[in-house]
Amino acid sequence: MISRSNSFPAVGVGLWLVLAGGAAVMMLLPGIVAPSRAATLVYLGAFSFGSMMAMAALAQLLARATRLAHSQARVAAFGSILLGAIWTLHAATE
């Protein structure tokens, strides 16, 4: 039996999937009511290109964020080693 506190993530994922499924149907509607087959193909091509560009932009943003976090971790590691060395030298000279 699933406890009440553990059911909220499942409900959230379910709602997200319902919204994503509805978005696919909404994406097809302009293509269905287009006046010609050429207009439908242009619409679908432009939508596909826009989707690919949005995914590429998101991937680039996530890659930059990952690189930034990695470089900050190196700075933090170097800083902690430096601080430890300073404390050690300070304790040795007292």
Image: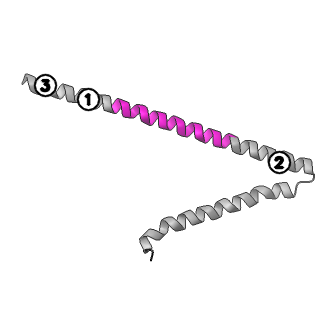
| Residue 43: assigned label | 2
**Residue at the spot 43% in from the left edge and 34% down from the top edge:** 70
Which secondary structure, mark 3? helix
Q: How far apart, in angstroms, are the residues tagged by discs 1 and 3?
A: 14 Å
Range covered by the magenta-colored residues:
53-76
Relative vertical location of residue 27 with respect to residue 74 in this rendering, above or below: below
Closer to us: 2 or 33:
2
Q: Mark 3 points at which residue?
A: 90
Q: Which amino acid does label 3 sit on?
A: His
| Residue 81: assigned label | 1
Q: Residues within 10 Å of mark 1 (few under 14, many from 20)?
A: few
Image depth: mark 2 or mark 1 in front:
1
The earlier-in-sequence mark between 1 and 3 is: 1
Relative vertical location of residue 46 with respect to residue 84 in this rendering, above or below: below
Q: How far apart, in angstroms, are the residues tagged by discs 2 and 1?
A: 57 Å
In this rendering, position of residue 61 left or right of residue 30: left
Question: Is 60 in the magenta?
Answer: yes
Question: Is 86 in the magenta?
Answer: no
